[in-house]
Amino acid sequence: MKQILNTLYVQTQGAYLRLDHDTLQVEIEQKKALQMPLHHLGGITVFGNVLFSPFLIHRCAEDGRSLVWLTQHGRFKARLAGPTTGNVLLRRAQNEALNNASATLNIARYIVAGKLQNARSVLMRAAREAKTASDRSQLSQAATIHAEAIKNAETVADLEKLRGLEGYAAKAYFGVFTAMVRQHRDAFTFTERSRRPPKDPINALISFIYTLLANECVAACEGVGLDPQMGYLHALRPGRPALALDLMEELRAPLADRLALTLVNRSQLTPDNFIQRPGGTIHLTKDGRATLLAAYQKRKQEEVFHTVLDTKVPLGLVAHTQARLLARHLRNDVPTYQPFILR
């Protein structure tokens, strides 16, 4: 499997992206600021007032290249969807599994188990690196809660109880998130999860990364031929990419949360990289977004060992490998869906 990991992020307001033969050209104030071969790009994500030429949009749709539109502050607005790919029989199998309570619970159980194990690994690593006994104790207790939840997930009787189990562990995880913050803790204190809008810098940071990750999981589903809205753990709602959110669960802690903590703990992002808008909403500044996007792209290139594939893969391709593993399970090629667990 060969995938292109490079995503171009454009946040300069008024920029114009157009096709020039087989290259992408970025113009700012009618002057060429960047030109690069189109085949080097797996996707393009733009923020706010950034324009595409119709021919570039058509070409990206034909190639299956991802185009994502976000607001200037990183809230998802739209995504380009080209012709439907994949085998219709796969989507039929996806739907049949959704209509089978036992099959749905089985898939959701492994997704939750993978999420819990990866979150527990992040907690245990943070406990080892903790500077105070209080932080170490809090993190160890949360890791113990996750260990118990992993064990209980094996025998939980229905989907609602599984969701409750996952929610209880998530509450314990975010309850000690501040204990993993070692720099500027007063500014990056985590009180509660707030999404729309984020009300503090740490929520703004992880929500921004989750938005990027969710769109990549949508692309992974579509690349395999799965319907990104037809999920198993997340409830179905109009316009909600439930399956993409399912795949994202295993990657929240090892990719998104660890990246956020690294940026804060290394002081690559400081309180000065956040701004408060009317109504109390907190957003990253333009410089803060640039720092995060560069680090996110670098993090995706890091290779990790995939226990199911028994080989190393770039972290940015894990969503694609998991979508393929799920497709194999839905086709009955393998008896269970095997989650990604970071070693």
Image (cartoon, rainbow, N blue to C red):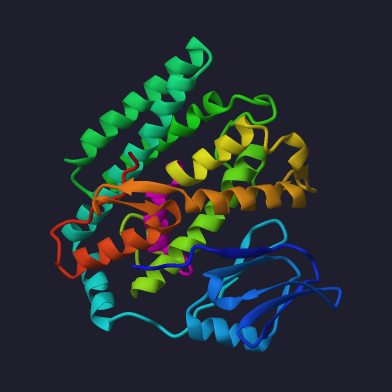
Q: Judge from the rendering whether residue 50 lies leftward or rightward of residue 241; answer left or right.
A: right
- SS assignment for the magenta stretch, majority: helix
List x then y, in percent, for residue 61.
52, 83
Residues shaded magenta: 237-253
User: Is residue 307 at least partly visible in the picture?
Assistant: yes
Residue drawn at point x = 68 percent, y = 85 percent: 20
Residue 162 rendering spot, x and y as whole percentages: 28, 44
Is residue 185 left or right of 148 when viewed as pictured? right
* Residue positioned 46% across, 65% down in the render: 240
Quarter of the picture containing the C terminus is: top left
In-front residue for pair 60/228: 60
Query: Which part of the image, by quadrant, shows the N terminus?
Result: bottom left
From what the image shows, is residue 101 above or below residue 228? above
Q: Is residue 330 above or below residue 20?
A: above
Q: How many marks?
A: 0
Could you say where residue 230 lies in the image, as x and y percent from the top left? 35, 68
Answer above or below: position of 166 versus 64.
above
Asked if the magenta segment contains residue 283, the reply would be no
> Seen from this angle, which residue lies furthest right?
29
The residue under the point 48% across, 79% down is 64
Magenta run includes residue 247: yes
- Which of the pair 194/216 is nearer the observer? 216
Whole-percent x, y for residue 121 in the image:
37, 33
Q: What residue appears at the point 78 percent right and 37 percent down from the top-left corner?
A: 272
